[in-house]
Amino acid sequence: MTFTERLAEYVRACFTGLWIESHEHQDALVAMAQLCRQEDWRMATWDIDQGLKLPRAETEAGASDPLAAIRAINSLATPEGTAILVLQNFHRFMQSAEIVQALSQQVVTGKQNRTIIVVLSPVVSLPVELEKLFVVLEHELPNREQLTEIAEGVATEDGEFPEGQERETILDAAVGLTRFEAENAFSLSLIQEGRLNASTLWEQKAQMLKKSGTLQLYRGGDDFSRLGGLSALKAFTKRSLLQPNRNNPLKRPRGVMLLSPPGCGKSQFCKALGSEVGRPVLILDVGSLMGSLVGQSEERTRHTLRTIDAMAPCVVMIDEVEKAFAGVNGQSDSGVAARMFGTFLGWLNDHQSDVFVVCTANDVSKLPPEFSRSERFDGVFFVDLPTREEKDAIWDIYLNLFEIEPNQRRPKDDQFTGAEIRACCRLAALLDVTLVQAAQNVVPVAVTAVESVERLRTWASGRCLDASRPGIYQHDGGSGKSRRRVSRDPSNN
């Protein structure tokens, strides 16, 4: 159901207090004006700069006073008609007791003469006195059809707006932008490239996310060929994400949870996944969602999740999620982290958008059990220290990356993670020494944190999928072998 259809239903039902959340006031006003013309409703608008604008371009003198604007709506009422007053950016006046009282009285009395108060604002900031009197509607970002209309209006010459798969790629890059931002991005692309180009749109989208401060767009070029090991995890995610397009949201992949000691490639896997399947990677910084005002953290969380939904299809990475939601089980922050965590859990379970979520964690003891239950993730994988074959592949990747002689003797790497192999290669190139000499400066995490690594392996045994081999992860601490293969048809992954 579109924004105008929902608005029409509420007005016909005589909901006299409506709060419309929108960052595109002009487009929302145009849509409301068209609806009022179709339904023969009277509509007036008010803002602090232009004052009160009545129907037929009349302007009431001295109507820049917000209290006077609220009271003026009754002059628009007719015996059989409906009158709508749109108050732009009126959240700025909600700290005034007189404004709140006037709105409360008008919403109640509006039932008698069908006068509707509409607050148009980029944020929802309802005082407690008005919470039960207003209904919140969302003016959505443009969909693909609307973005196509905007692009065709900007790119009017032949060849400027390509057809086929290239057009779909351009629209994928534009999804999540407002109408104003999309028009600017399309115009900039024409100036720079002479045609619409997805790379320019991604740059503009990165700017948009940078302004929000909560999401970062990662556009690196590394794919799975630059990531050694994790064959079962790679196969599972590629198969789920590269299946033919499904129209049924219930059949869309949801995401994976990755558990491992530090340095085993969880974050690098997520970044490479985006390039491998052709999706942008959004990095969510949960700490940036925290606000100093009451309710601000929860509102930022909801706004960020709506932004993520609008940018689908995409991959979302939440790194070290157990630290991101620290305080969930305590009350040191008056329950703010718990409420944010609850909002995120609800979204994980219920979202219908084509968003693939990858969460990583190093300490399972800090995660509540409900976080990793079925239907929030498609699978919970344990990423152990790389096997001998995986280590050899990782050595080859980083020896080539740092331009190191590949035939020299390698150090003993039984306890090395992928990050420590990279560190050894980087130090060898930096210090111009052999790999064996460079390894003397690397202390593996499996040595410095042997107790926590062993505890993590023990917990994951029988509970998690194995990221390197098809099947359930099994740990045999007594034999010195970190995994025992479980028979399972690889096609299941």
Image: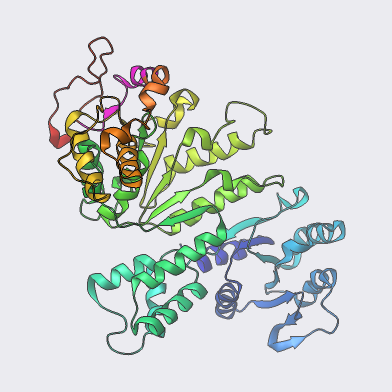
Q: Quadrant of the C terminus?
A: top left
> Is residue 274 depicted above or below 464 in this figure?
below
- Magenta span contains residue 456: yes
> Is residue 171 depicted above or below 325 in this figure?
below
Farthest bottom residue? 157
**Residue closer to the observer: 380 or 222:** 222
Q: Is residue 350 left or right of residue 293?
A: left
**Residue closer to the observer: 222 or 343:** 222
Q: Which residues are magenta?
A: 454-468
**Residue closer to the observer: 232 or 144:** 232
Q: Position of residue 352 (x, y in %)?
A: 39, 49
Q: Residue at x 47, y 22 (%)?
A: 365
Residue 277 sits in quarter: bottom left
Q: Quadrant of the N terminus?
A: bottom left
Residue 419 shows in the view: yes
Q: Position of residue 117 (x, y in %)?
A: 71, 66
Q: Is residue 487 left or right of residue 3?
A: left
Residue 143 shows in the view: no
Q: Position of residue 83 (x, y in %)?
A: 69, 73
Q: Is residue 157 left or right of residue 403?
A: right
Residue 195 sits in quarter: bottom left
**Residue closer to the observer: 146 or 41:** 146
Q: Give the color scheme: rainbow, by chain, secondary structure or one colour.
A: rainbow
Q: Position of residue 375 (x, y in %)?
A: 36, 36
Question: Looking at the image, how many numbered discs can be counted on the residues?
Answer: 0
Q: Residue at x 47, y 27 (%)?
A: 367
Q: Is residue 103 left or right of residue 400?
A: right
Q: Residue at x 58, y 74 (%)?
A: 32
Farthest top residue? 478
- Magenta span contains residue 329: no
